[in-house]
Image (spheres, rainbow, N blue to C red):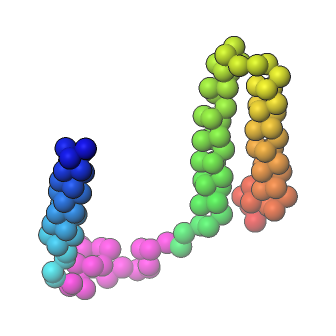
Amino acid sequence: MLIMISTISLTLTLCSLIMFLSTTLSKKTILDREKMSPFECGFDPQSSARLPFSLRFFLIAVIFLIFDVEITLLLPLANLSTLTDLQAWSFVTTLFLLILLLGLYYEWGKGALEWSQ
């Protein structure tokens, strides 16, 4: 037990020290306007280099990630069908797919999947 506590305390101390060193060493000390500008070639920019971010693209990307993770949760269910009761397996699989479909229809109804708005 003493070895485990000392290992945990050593790990936490080492991680804290590394995090402290990385934050102090990575600070930029020179805040020059020319260095902070997106173009450093000597010319003034004609327009803003910071384009507005599309929130619709972000929402579709998040929805894609959520459904992608849920598909990876569905794949092991095929292997579990031989190890468990068929009735319980089909109930769990049907419930999981129903929740997925309800989420998809909800997002579709709210218009989050329409790109051209």
Rendered view: 66 above or below 87:
below
What's the magenta region? 31-51
Give the residue drawn at x 44%, y 78%: 48
Image coordinates of residue 96 in percent, x first then y, are 76, 38
Q: Report the predominant secondary structure element of the magenta stretch.
A: loop
Rendered view: 78 above or below 108:
above
Q: Foreground residue, 36 or 45?
A: 36
Magenta stretch: includes residue 34 = yes
Regarding residue 15, the answer to whether it shows in the image is: no
Regarding residue 20, the answer to whether it shows in the image is: yes
Rendered view: 15 above or below 75:
below
Tell me the quarter of the image containing the N terminus. Answer: top left
Image coordinates of residue 69 in percent, x first then y, are 60, 41
Kindly indicate the quadrant of the structure image that contains residue 59: bottom right
Q: Is residue 103 left or right of residue 66?
A: right
Q: Foreground residue, 19 or 83?
A: 83
